[in-house]
């Protein structure tokens, strides 16, 4: 499935033009595509139904449906409503588990996405990034690819704890073990980020079928090759995963938003004295002291 | 309760006071004297200000260990060849041009190896300054007692004190239980919540003792025998649980040690370096007249449905604590606020998302994400989020105090918070 589109979203300071390309593919090995996508400006998400679980595809579709029900297209939402959509998704996916004949079978899915929200001060909008599981949201500024979300995976926890290095995580036998999922528990705990929306911003949302087959360097190369034009980028990324083997379902959405003005119309913070470079985007885990 | 091996050369001085242990070369006794009254408060800030004030290269070797009364977390700052052991974690400043800093959860035993450990008799020290070559400081034994003003250091006062053999090389330590690697699963892997700017040094480690240490290894007074058996999650110290919260513990967005989040929500202690004594809290609450009740409203657990979550933003109990913004508007402190020129919210988990509040838009003096403000336990707590130019707080009648980056600092009503560039806000009671 491929879809490209764009929309104009009214915001307090004018309007945001948002273009996206989205593609999901069953891959070269699997017979069922358990990934689902939502691209309904200004809400975008990928959900990866858990492999080997009953109704993984139904679970990821249920998340998309829950978001459609909770969030209107065409206008910024609020953080509360996005959270409601996630919690509602959890309830729906849990219901899927309960109504089955398979007894202990449990449906589950990841969800990673972005939604434009008005966080309440009425002076600007934010991109709310949310994540449960090991699908990912990256930010691309034209030069650097930055992973915004932190995987809820066993290997990520081991990396954070300093037990293994990031490179080892890719080969680790537990690399497919996720520690949080929609539908896994009575209460889901999403991670959330709020990134000020300004200027021109590009986000990549993908399932692990992309990030495990195509490295960050290659992803950045593909994104750079199109000089920040969203059209067709998701297709090109998925094609790269297919060439690399695509042992899992592969999904990608590339979102480009343009609020007018420079990417950082506020300029950078002026140094009054000493200080640290500020981290706008990501709270990276600081090693255990040191 | 500490023990030390006297250093007859008198080259090093170890000061024990309250929740802080500071080791300095004897020739810096002047600094020690200056720092002594300040060890009770924000010891780390004062020590660094004092010792590194005239340049880091001029700073002497030192070791500072501060334990957080509520959580038992021990934090060590070490410069030079001193070796500090926090439980099983060793911290040394050797090979580092500045200093090393580590924090270890779970009431680790503290040992500072200063010089070659010589033979000798270990002596107790409760509070005071001693010339020492080794200091051992068991955390969590005597915290329930109020700190004494003087250092009587009388072993007789400690009942059932085990005769401690000389053990310069710590023969008992290697027998400590091997760290167990916790197999990740849904329960143990419940990751700690993270708030932007809050130190990640408090994140739980995977290695933890499999079993309690044998009691014989601990020269603990008998009176603390029950406390010794306490696990990390059941604090020895009285944990401050504001009565207004009722039976349900408030949901916390702060990082919580994994052990606590797994099964002991009772640990509501201080995660941010803020330690408030229960009596202070009561006094403050009485002064604020119901601020605590409002905080309870703001901090209410959000395990309910979407309606409850939505309602949290418009707290029905109208919190009296607020910020007066530069334009004169009043910004109620409900939940958590993040202020800046274009504030971003880092990874947060759960149902309560900090509210971004724009201040100083367009002024490059202000960082995009500059300051966090929240009400915790009825007190306003401000945290500079590693802003480029820093934040000063001016309490009424007090000199300005520059916030240490990422360190939560409680402030009283009427305090002015200066973000620089002429942008000031004030904590007010509405």
Image (cartoon, rainbow, N blue to C red):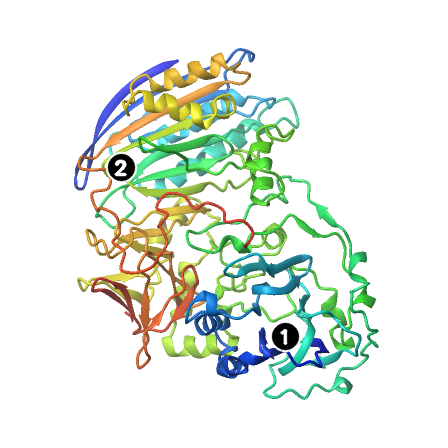
Alpha-carbon span between mark 1 and mark 2? 51 Å
Q: Is residue A206 above or below residue A131?
A: above
Say left or right for A187 vs A232: right
Q: Is residue A136 above or below residue A128?
A: above
**In front: B392, or B57?**
B57
Q: Residue B289, can we see it?
A: yes
Residue A101 at x, y percent in the picture: 63, 22
Mark 1 chain? B
Residue A221 at x, y percent in the picture: 38, 23
Quarter of the figure that contains the C terminus of chain B:
bottom left
Q: Secondary structure at mark 1?
A: loop
Say left or right for B172 vs B416: right
Residue under numbered circle 1: B143
What is the quadrant of residue B189 in the picture?
A: top right
Residue B101 at x, y percent in the picture: 54, 60
Q: Is residue A97 above or below residue B377?
A: above
Residue under numbered circle 2: A76
What is the quadrant of residue B21 in the picture?
A: bottom right
Say left or right for B341 vs B403: left
Q: Which residue is depicted at the point 20% across and 54% down?
A: B363
Q: Which mark is residue A127?
A: none
Q: Which residue is depicted at the point 45% across and 65% down?
A: B56
Q: Are marks 1 and 2 on the same chain?
A: no
Mark 2: few/some/many CA within 10 Å (<14, 14-19, 20+): many
Quarter of the figure that contains the N terminus of chain B:
bottom right
Q: Residue B127, can we see it?
A: no
Q: Secondary structure at mark 2?
A: loop
Q: Which mark is nearer the camera, 1 or 2?
A: 1
Residue B133 at x, y percent in the picture: 69, 74
What is the quadrant of residue A130 in the picture?
A: top left
Q: Which residue is depicted at the point 27% across and 56% down?
A: A271
Count the marks: 2
């Amino acid at each position: 499935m491929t879809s490209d589109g764009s929309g104009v979203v009214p915001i307090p300071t004018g309007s945001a033009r948002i273009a996206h390309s989205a593609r999901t593919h069953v891959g070269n090995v699997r017979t069922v595509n358990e990934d689902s996508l939502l691209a309904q400006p200004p809400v975008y998400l990928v959900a990866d139904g858990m492999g080997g679980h009953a109704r993984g595809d139904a679970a990821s579709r249920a998340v998309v449906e829950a978001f459609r029900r909770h969030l209107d297209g065409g206008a910024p939402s609020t953080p509360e409503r996005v959270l409601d959509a996630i919690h509602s998704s959890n309830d729906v996916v849990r219901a899927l588990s309960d109504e089955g004949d398979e007894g202990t079978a449990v449906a589950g899915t990841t969800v990673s996405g972005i939604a434009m929200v008005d966080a309440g001060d009425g002076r600007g909008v934010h991109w709310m990034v949310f994540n449960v599981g090991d699908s990912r949201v990256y930010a691309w500024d034209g030069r650097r690819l930055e992973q915004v979300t932190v995987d809820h995976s066993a290997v990520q926890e081991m990396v954070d704890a300093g037990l293994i290095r990031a490179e080892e995580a890719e080969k680790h036998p537990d690399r497919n073990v996720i520690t949080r999922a929609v539908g896994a528990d009575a209460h889901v705990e999403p991670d959330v980020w709020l990134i000020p929306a300004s200027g021109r911003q590009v986000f990549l949302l993908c399932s692990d079928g992309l990030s495990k087959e195509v490295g960050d360097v290659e992803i950045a190369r593909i994104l750079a090759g199109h000089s920040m034009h969203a059209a067709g980028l998701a297709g090109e990324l998925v094609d790269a995963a297919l060439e690399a083997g695509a042992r899992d379902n592969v999904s990608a959405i590339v979102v480009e938003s343009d609020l007018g003005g420079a990417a950082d119309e506020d300029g950078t913070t002026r140094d009054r004295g000493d200080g640290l470079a500020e981290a706008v985007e990501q709270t990276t885990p600081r090693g255990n002291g040191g | 309760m500490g023990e030390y091996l006297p250093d007859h050369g008198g080259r090093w001085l170890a000061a024990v006071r309250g929740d802080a242990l500071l080791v300095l070369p004897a020739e810096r006794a002047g600094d020690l004297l200056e720092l002594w009254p300040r060890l009770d408060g924000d010891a780390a800030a004062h020590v660094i200000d004092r010792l590194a004030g005239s340049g880091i290269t001029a700073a002497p070797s030192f070791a500072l260990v501060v334990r957080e009364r509520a959580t038992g977390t021990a934090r060590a700052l070490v410069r030079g060849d001193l070796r500090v052991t926090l439980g099983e974690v060793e911290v040394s400043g050797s090979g580092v041009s500045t200093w090393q800093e580590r924090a270890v959860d779970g009431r680790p035993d503290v040992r500072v190896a200063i010089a070659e450990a010589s033979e000798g008799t270990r002596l107790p020290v409760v509070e005071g300054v001693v010339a020492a070559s080794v200091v051992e400081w068991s955390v969590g034994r005597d915290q329930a007692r109020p700190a004494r003003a003087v250092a009587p250091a009388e072993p007789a006062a400690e009942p059932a004190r085990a005769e401690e053999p000389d053990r310069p090389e710590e023969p008992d330590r290697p027998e400590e239980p091997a760290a167990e690697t916790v197999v990740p699963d849904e329960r143990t892997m419940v990751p700690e919540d993270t708030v932007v700017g809050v130190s990640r040094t408090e994140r739980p480690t995977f290695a933890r003792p499999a079993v309690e240490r044998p009691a014989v290894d601990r020269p603990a007074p008998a009176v603390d025998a029950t406390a010794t058996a306490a696990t990390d999650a059941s604090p020895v110290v009285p944990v401050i649980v504001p009565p207004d919260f009722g039976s349900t513990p408030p949901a916390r967005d702060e990082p919580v040690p994994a052990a606590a989040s797994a099964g002991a929500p009772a640990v509501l202690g201080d995660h941010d370096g803020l330690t408030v004594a229960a009596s202070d809290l009561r006094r403050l609450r009485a002064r604020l007249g119901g601020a605590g009740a409002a905080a309870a409203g703001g901090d209410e657990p959000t395990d309910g449905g979407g309606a409850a979550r939505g309602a949290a933003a418009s707290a029905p109990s109208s919190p009296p604590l607020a910020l007066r913004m530069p334009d004169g508007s009043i910004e109620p402190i409900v939940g958590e606020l993040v202020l800046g020129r274009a504030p971003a919210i880092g990874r947060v988990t759960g149902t309560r998302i900090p509210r971004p509040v724009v201040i100083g838009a367009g002024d490059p003096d202000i960082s995009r994400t500059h300051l966090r403000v929240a009400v915790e336990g009825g007190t306003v707590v401000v945290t500079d989020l590693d802003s480029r130019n820093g934040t000063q707080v001016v309490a009424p009648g007090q000199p300005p105090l520059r916030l240490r980056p990422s360190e939560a600092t409680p402030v009283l009503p009427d305090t002015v918070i200066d973000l620089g560039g002429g942008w000031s806000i004030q904590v007010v009671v509405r």
